[in-house]
Amino acid sequence: MRYAPPGLCVNDFALLRDDDGTYAVLHLQGPWTSEFDHLRMETSYGRATSADLVDWRPRGTAFGNGLPGRFDQQAVWTMHPFRHGSGMAMFYTGVSGLTPEGWPLQSVGLAYSDRTDGTGWRRHGTGPVVEADPRWYRTADRMGWRDPFVVRDDEGDGWAMVVCASDASLPVEVSGCVALATSPDLEHWTVHPPLISPGDVDELECPVLERLDDGGWLLLGSVGATRGFDSWTAPTLRGPWTRRGALGPTGAYAPRVIPGPDGSRVVLHTTPRRVGLTDTGDRCRGMLAQPKSLVVHEDSAPRLEWWPGLDRWLGAETDGPLLHAVGDIAVSGRPVEITLRTDAPGSARPALTIGCDGKNLRATGPDGSTLDETVLSEAPARLRVLTIGEYVEVYADDVFALTTLCYSGHPAPWTATTDGVPRPIPTRPVHLPDPTRDDASAIWPGPVGA
């Protein structure tokens, strides 16, 4: 259901779909740790394949950092591979080293492959193809020039690239922007002023462009400070861009869009874990989460909804305790507390609950500690809760609204309490694609003796 390579964690990623319908993910990979090492932790891309965007199988390493003296000698970060001719092109972030103050020096390189499955890459030359232009962007300490994403330019015959960058005209703490560059041939690029520079974002990472059915554009950008992602729309690539607000809750990051098996737009994103797999551990890079449906209506903001492709992984309803489960709860308009786990088998003391009081939605851990919370745009009529090990998602009227982590408690029959009166909530078990995995990447199996 979720994926990370054996013994490692997943960070930013890219999605491909081959002619036979097979999906492939290329992803940054590194060890579980809260102390991120810019130069050693992410020096290669892992690769995995799937037929359905749920059951992922590791296929080993597909790309690594460059030879000594090259622009990508220390690390390779976020990439964007796409079809080009009979094969593929891939733009990727290279890190050459650190500034004297310890900031990673970033630029964008190019590789080609004659294949379409995410393997067989060969670099285009030994240097980057596009670098930050100091007229508009920081180029040393606090710089950003990473996470390239390339599409056909809708105002010319060539290509357009968006890049996570730092606007040199703004204070560093609000300088996060999306840079723009154009090219006639993928190999020679002209850098332009920022495409989007909100003025209230520290980092605007992993930009994604998606062409909409009406010919307009959707841009997704991950906000460093909130650890979520926002959306913008525009009639053309050059704008004007309209900010549409958060598309995913805090904890969902680095999204990618791809056609699902039925042709509908699907979003996958990363989700963190905690060091040591405990509630007190620092959040660290983690897993690839299960897909969401991307819904874009002309007259409203984009949103992420429950993806029907997950339904085939759900079993029949039960009233028994489950660690991996989905349940639907009708909300009457009065405050409700939904107990998912208790502190011991058979106990009535909650260890994990979801609470909804009008527009206020929250997840609560042991001793009533708040794990995560959000304010909805309107009070929901129905909640859907999904738990997979420590990972929890909440959908409000089918829209993805909250996600959290909790490594405490024992599975218990779900109950919803309103006005002091509890009622049982039937749940459907989630069948994991690979439930026997037992390594650092495995889904948390619950407390000993659960």
Image: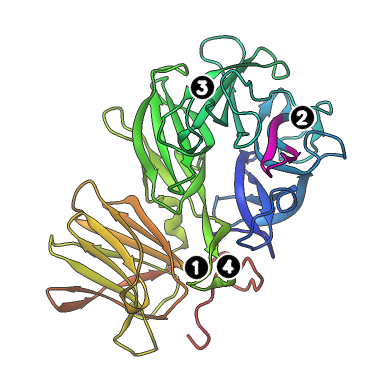
Callout 2 amino acid: Tyr
Looking at the picture, which amino acid does disc 1 mark? His
Label 4: which secondary element = helix
Residue visible at 64% across and 25% down in the picture: 132
Residue at 47% across, 72% down: 279
The quarter holding residue 316 reads bottom left
Mark 2 and mark 1 lie on one chain; the one further toward the N terminus is 2
- Sooner in the amino-acid sequence: mark 3 or mark 2: 2
Q: Is residue 415 left or right of residue 265?
A: left
- Any mark on residue 431, and which? 1
| First of labels 4, 2 by sequence position | 2
Task: Write the residue at 39% across / 27% down.
Answer: 233
Q: CA distance from mark 3 to mark 1?
A: 45 Å
Q: Secondary structure at mark 1?
A: loop
Q: Is residue 256 above or below residue 214?
A: below
Q: Which mark is residue 312?
A: none
Q: Which residue is mark 3?
A: 194
Q: Callout 2: few (<14), some (14-19), or many (20+) C-alpha neighbours within 10 Å?
A: many
Identify the residue position indicated by label 4 in the image: 275
Q: CA distance from mark 4 to mark 1?
A: 26 Å
Q: Could you give the CA–CA distance between mark 3 and mark 2, rounded to whole angstroms? A: 27 Å
Along the line of sight, the residue nearer the viewer: 375 or 154? 375
Horizontal placement of 309 versus 337: left or right? right
Disc nearer the start of the sequence (4/1): 4
Magenta stretch bounds: 95-108
Q: Is residue 443 above or below residue 150?
A: below
- Front tag of 3 and 1: 3
Whether pointer 2 and pointer 1 mark residues with C-beta atoms closer than 8 Å, the reply is: no
Label annotation for residue 112: 2
